[in-house]
Image (cartoon, rainbow, N blue to C red):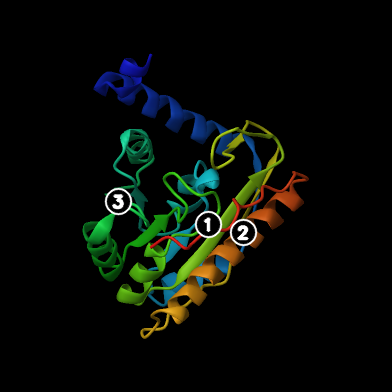
């Protein structure tokens, strides 16, 4: 099975299957979206942004955003990341290889170029391997260089499973209802270094966690807690 999953034919089949499942879930749920005005205002002002959501809430984000803004998603170039990239390509979203913690300078340059060309970027600041709901510092560095705001986004569903993975992955099932919430933009000062940069990183982490937990509350779900604190990633 593992060899099939990693084979080109296996990844083509699985990406087709997952993309179809995402379409099915999105179209069979009743969605409430809050905070759309934030995205509309940034797009009207021609200010591309970095959209952040926790790794556990990745599944439905392309459906929520792809029709609203020109979007590319940062995907880690490991084996699972390749499958994710193929899946979201089927949903019409291009990818950038790298991660906010492990992508290095090449990923940072690609993110900044995309933002300055007018394309918004979607990232999971705790991906690809955690710790859960702890933001790496790379997203703040990219936002600072590009002069782009960071926009926290979260979702939850009433009919879903919480998987026993490192990120407590939120797997929506068809039908039921869901809520998507867009938070207020977080600006990164051009001179944010050292303690000031860490303050912004913590703000991203805290606001994104609060937004995610509010989505869970509105769907009557138990709140997923962040992993224990540790030294900030860079």
The percent position of residue 12, horizontal first and vertical second, equals 31, 25
Q: Which mark is residue 98?
A: 3
How would you rate the neighbour count of disc 1 (Cα within 10 Å): few for under 14, some for 14-19, many for 20 or more? many
The residue at 36%/75% (across/down) is: 144
Which sits in the foreground, 113 or 19? 113
Q: Which residue lies furthest to the front in this view?
A: 231
N-term mark: 1 or 3? 3
Q: Do the residues labelled 1 and 2 touch (CB within 8 Å)?
A: no
Q: Determine whether 212 is above or below 14 in the image.
A: below
Which sits in the foreground, 183 or 19? 183
Q: What element carries label 2?
A: helix
Q: What element carries label 3?
A: loop
Residue 122 image-quadrant placement: bottom left
Judged left or right of residue 93, residue 226 is right
Q: Name the residue under label 2.
A: 209
N-term mark: 2 or 3? 3
How would you rate the neighbour count of disc 3 (Cα within 10 Å): few for under 14, some for 14-19, many for 20 or more? many
Q: Which residue lies furthest to the right in this view?
A: 220
Marks 1/2: CA distance?
9 Å
Marks 1/3: CA distance?
17 Å
Q: Mark 1 points at which residue?
A: 134
The residue at 46%/78% (across/down) is: 187
């Amino acid at each position: 099975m593992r060899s099939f999953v990693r084979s080109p034919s296996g990844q083509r089949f699985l990406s087709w299957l997952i993309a179809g499942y995402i379409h099915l879930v999105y179209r069979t749920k009743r969605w409430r979206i809050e905070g759309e005005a934030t995205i509309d205002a940034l797009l009207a002002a021609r200010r591309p942004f970095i959209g952040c959501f926790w790794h556990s809430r990745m599944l439905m984000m392309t459906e929520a955003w792809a029709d609203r803004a020109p979007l590319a998603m940062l995907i880690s170039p490991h084996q699972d990341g390749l499958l994710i990239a193929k899946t979201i390509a089927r949903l019409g979203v291009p990818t950038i290889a790298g991660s906010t913690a492990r992508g290095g300078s090449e990923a940072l340059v690609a993110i900044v170029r995309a933002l300055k060309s007018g394309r918004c970027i979607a990232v999971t600041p705790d991906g690809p391997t955690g710790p859960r709901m702890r933001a790496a510092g790379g997203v703040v560095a990219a936002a600072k260089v590009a002069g782009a705001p960071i926009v926290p986004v979260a979702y939850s569903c009433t009919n879903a499973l919480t998987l026993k993975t490192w990120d407590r992955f939120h797997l929506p099932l068809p039908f039921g209802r869901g809520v998507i919430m867009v938070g207020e933009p977080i600006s990164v000062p051009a001179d944010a270094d050292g303690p000031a940069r860490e303050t912004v990183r913590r703000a991203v982490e805290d606001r994104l966690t609060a937004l995610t937990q509010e989505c869970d509350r509105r769907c009557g779900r138990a709140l997923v807690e962040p992993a224990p604190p540790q030294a900030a990633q860079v």
